[in-house]
Image (cartoon, grey):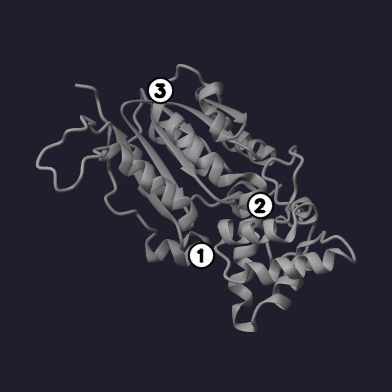
Amino acid sequence: MGNHSSFHRPVLLEETISLLRPRSSGRYLDGTVGGGGHARALLEASSPGGRLWGLDRDPEAIEETSAVLKPFANRSKLFQANFRHARELLPGLALDGILLDLGVSSYQLDTTSRGFSCDRSGPLDMRMDTGERLSAAQVLEEEDEEAIAVILRRCGEEPFSRKIAREIVAVRRQQPVRTTGELAEIVCRAVPRRAERKSLVRVFQALRIQVNDEIGALESALESLFGMLAPEGRLAVISYHSLEDRPVKRYFNSLADPCTCPPDLPFCACGRVPTARVVTRKPVKPAPEEIETNPRSRSAKLRVLEKLAVS
């Protein structure tokens, strides 16, 4: 276990807290609590009476956050759970703010035994919840060539998906692909030298997303999380690549502008009215200073939605 500061450096911390507007009577959910950086800041900003519920799929993240949030134990509660199950875990709760910080944590990337990084040789695991059955090695063992190519293309937007899938299947006929180093070698053999680095990142991303059903969890959770907001409550989502950002943008826009009438119709005939407003017209991105101190924040985008009060 890393020390508290190294577990995960919270991205866009000041911007997120400012846009969630925490207050003393508020109730907040951090659906991806990680190392507790955002959660701690929310609890500090909502002192003395604000309450926070924190979820994470990773048992090590929950253990770390328990230590970080010890001073706030009377105002916070943690669950090892996927944020897609938040509504069942916390039925009837009306929240003033919800945060999802998507993607993989620095701790997960830097821990060799977790198998998330193409730069560290370790078991090809990639499970965020280590209690689940399916690892990245099992995906590569059980799926056929076509299915592997589809995963790499759909979850990694990898242009050499077919070549890589073919090479994986050729190698596994001799022996299973069990380590991150073995997979990295296969990818580098299958793609042009100039493309090696980008392909490695995309292939590892694709397998991680597949193993953890990250896009499925996000798409199924957005509606239920919005339903948990109190009027004027806000939902903030930090994404790190277009596969995460697109469904968030699409869902936010569908609530803020639900009209389905043809654009040339002079009046609205469908009767659909907005239930939310998009607070961030353009996504908030890290300042150059943050990128310099935390290069992994480079691709981060923060979008925030506010639930409209019923008139």
Of the two numbered discs 1 and 2 on the same chain, state the one appearing first in sequence: 2
Using a 10 Å C-alpha cutoff, classify the residue at mark 1 as few (fewer than 14 neighbours), some (14 to 19) or many (20 or more): few
What percent of the width, then of the height, locates residue 53? 51, 28
Cα gap from disc 1 to disc 2, whole angstroms: 16 Å
Q: Amino acid at mark 3?
A: Gly
- Image side of residue 24 versus residue 172, left or right: left
Asked whether the beta carbons under mark 1 and mark 2 sit within 8 Å of each other, the answer is no
Q: Residues within 10 Å of mark 3 (few under 14, many from 20)?
A: some
Question: Which label sits on residue 213?
Answer: none
Q: Which kind of residue does numbered mark 2 sit on? A: Gln
Instruction: Name the residue rendered at 28%, 31% in the picture.
Output: 275
Q: Is residue 32 visible?
A: no
**What is the distance, in whole Å, between disc 3 and disc 2 at their CAs?**
32 Å
| Residue at the limit of the structure toward the top, as seen here | 92
**Mark 2: secondary structure:** helix
| Nearer to us: label 1 or label 3 | 1
What number is the disc on residue 49? Answer: 3
Question: In the rendering, which numbered label is found on residue 295?
Answer: 1
Read off the residue under disc 2: 108
Marks 1 and 3, how far apart at CA: 35 Å
Is 217 displayed left or right of 248 in the figure?
Answer: right
Q: Is residue 8 above or below residue 223?
A: below
The answer to whether residue 100 is seen in the rendering is yes
Identity, as a three-letter code, of the amino acid under mark 1: Pro
Q: Secondary structure at mark 1?
A: helix
- Left or right? Give the position of 66 relative to 141: left
